């Protein structure tokens, strides 16, 4: 699972790609005359959440070249408030500095980032002090079925658009940045709990023996997770009552949600300064284009960091000071927008136990061509098995080919019985196979087998 801090870094990691060159706020670039200049990039967020805070220092890199940023190492880094209290940071990995202690910003106080490089003459850098504004609670998360142009080919995609509403009667919080993370839980109705086809032995180009190996993983429940990776901002300047309404934060395509049993989304709201909001707005203006980030690149946005030793040095990035509020919601499919429910694919629609094409109890030689499937002793596999040893780790071996079981089916269970228990069947032992479509039997088609998230509510 991703932590709150790692979600912040998903946002922060976008910034170096958005920053190239500027003189004041935005500098128009002549693409034909562009040359690379190595610039310092600062990334960091201080919030009123009690936790370890992180600052990342690195240098820009050419658009064409190594994608790994060059870290600024061995710097002395700390945060100061308006009362003179200092919070020291230590470098735990190259260019990444964590606060020595857990701490939180306090509403109404000013904070600034300070760091001194150890290379050269030890240059000092500071951010412009910013006021920490408390974030009001998120009032509501809503959703509706929408259509979105998905790519440069103007392909329209249906999906569930999630919106947030918030309001601040005090009028102190007017500028907001948003992040989201979500989780999709899928539970298959007929999990393949016991066996799957494994190694085969070939003779003269034909499959003679097929080994049936135990299914060691529980493939009933899987999860997949999504995280925001773009700038999401809003303000209440033009609204009445200091409200922000219907801010689109997450578009979840129908294909992303199909066959899910339960869905959860958390929206994180940051109350930022007007200066931070303007910084992010300019980043969106100059960098959010279809295709490459640089398709419509016209200039660079400088943040709130300055060099105290060189007024002409351009420093990129932003040290954000913000209050945080969070809201997580859980949904069953029928609790989502009803227009979405009408186009959503339900597991029960394709995995009904009574549907003969989707799920059957198949007896050897009846429903599928399994006439040549015999339990037997196979020296190549270290011997065969009998009914009384089925739970032992001795390989289960069928003589013949598994082609009788369709490729898009899995074996859910195998029941073995002596040949004399069934009339007119050949072989030393026979087996009854219970099979189902893979899409109904293996949740790994929809996500990963992971431990249930700590926040999950069934």
Image (cartoon, rainbow, N blue to C red):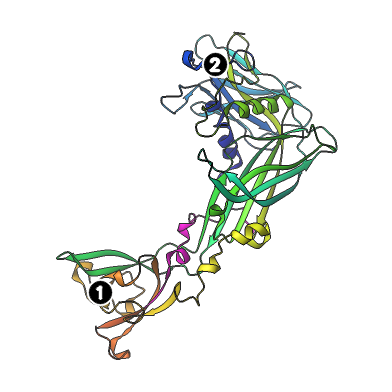
- In three-dimensional space, the C-alpha distance between marks 2 and 1, rounded to whole angstroms, equals 74 Å
Residue stretch in magenta: 433-458
Specify few, some or many for label 1: CA neighbours under 10 Å numbering under 14, 14-19, or 20 or more.
some
Magenta span has 32?
A: no
Q: Quadrant of residue 284?
A: top right
Residue at image mark 1: 384
Which is nearer the N-term, disc 2 or disc 1? 2
Relative side of 167 to 391, left or right:
right
Position above or below: 257 against 138: below
Q: Using the rendered image of the protein, determine whether residue 458 is visible from the camera's viewpoint.
A: no
Horizontal and vertical percent for residue 101? 63, 33
Horizontal and vertical percent for residue 182? 60, 49
Q: Secondary structure at mark 2?
A: loop
Q: Are marks 2 and 1 in contact (CB under 8 Å)?
A: no
Q: Secondary structure at mark 1?
A: loop
Q: Nearer the viewer, mark 2 or mark 1?
A: 2
Q: Nearer the viewer, residue 440 or 454?
A: 440
Specify few, some or many for label 2: CA neighbours under 10 Å numbering under 14, 14-19, or 20 or more.
some
The residue located at (66%, 28%) in the rendering is: 281
Horizontal and vertical percent for residue 14? 55, 31
The residue located at (59%, 15%) in the rendering is: 27
Q: Nearer the viewer, residue 119 or 250?
A: 250
Q: Quadrant of the C terminus?
A: bottom right
Position above or below: 62 against 426: above
Q: Using the rendered image of the protein, determine whether residue 277 is visible from the camera's viewpoint.
A: yes
Q: Which mark is residue 29?
A: 2
């Amino acid at each position: 699972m991703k932590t709150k801090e790692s979600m912040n870094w998903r946002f922060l990691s976008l910034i170096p790609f958005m920053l190239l060159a500027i003189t004041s706020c935005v500098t128009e670039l002549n693409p034909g005359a562009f040359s690379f200049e190595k610039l310092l990039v600062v990334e960091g967020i201080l919030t009123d959440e009690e936790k370890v805070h992180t600052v990342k220092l690195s240098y820009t890199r050419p658009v064409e070249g190594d994608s790994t940023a060059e870290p600024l190492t061995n710097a002395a880094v700390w945060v100061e408030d308006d009362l003179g209290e200092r919070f020291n940071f230590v470098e735990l990995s190259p260019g990444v500095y964590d606060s020595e202690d857990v701490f939180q910003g306090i509403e109404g106080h000013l904070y600034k980032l300070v760091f001194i490089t150890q290379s050269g003459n030890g240059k000092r850098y500071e951010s412009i002090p910013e006021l920490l504004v408390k974030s009001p609670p998120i009032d509501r998360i809503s959703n509706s079925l929408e259509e979105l142009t998905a790519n440069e080919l103007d392909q329209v995609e249906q999906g569930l658009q999630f919106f947030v509403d918030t309001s601040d009667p005090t009028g102190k919080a007017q500028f907001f940045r948003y992040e989201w993370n979500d989780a999709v839980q899928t539970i298959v109705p007929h999990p393949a709990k016991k066996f799957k086809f494994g190694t085969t032995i070939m003779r003269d180009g034909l499959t003679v023996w097929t080994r049936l190996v135990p299914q060691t993983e529980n493939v009933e429940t899987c999860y997949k997770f999504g995280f925001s990776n773009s700038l999401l901002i809003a303000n209440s300047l033009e609204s009445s009552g200091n409200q922000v309404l219907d801010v689109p934060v997450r578009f979840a395509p129908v294909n992303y949600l199909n066959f899910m049993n339960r869905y959860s989304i958390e929206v994180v709201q940051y109350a930022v300064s007007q200066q931070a909001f303007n910084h992010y707005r300019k980043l969106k203006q100059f960098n959010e284009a279809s295709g490459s980030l640089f398709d419509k690149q016209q200039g660079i946005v400088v943040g709130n960091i300055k060099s105290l030793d060189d007024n002409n040095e351009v420093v990129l990035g932003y040290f954000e000071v913000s209050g945080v509020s969070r809201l997580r919601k859980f949904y069953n499919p029928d609790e989502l927008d009803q227009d979405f429910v009408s186009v959503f694919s339900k597991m029960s629609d394709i995995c009904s136990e009574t549907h003969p094409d989707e799920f059957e109890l198949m007896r050897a030689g009846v429903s599928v061509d399994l006439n040549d499937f015999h339990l037997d002793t196979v020296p190549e596999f270290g011997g065969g098995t009998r009914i009384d040893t089925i739970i032992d780790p001795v390989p289960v071996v069928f003589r013949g080919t598994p082609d009788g079981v369709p490729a898009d089916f899995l074996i859910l269970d195998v029941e073995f019985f002596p040949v004399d228990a069934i009339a007119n069947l050949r072989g030393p032992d026979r087996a009854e196979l219970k099979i189902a479509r893979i899409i109904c039997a293996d949740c790994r088609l929809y996500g990963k087998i992971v431990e249930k998230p700590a926040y999950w509510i069934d």
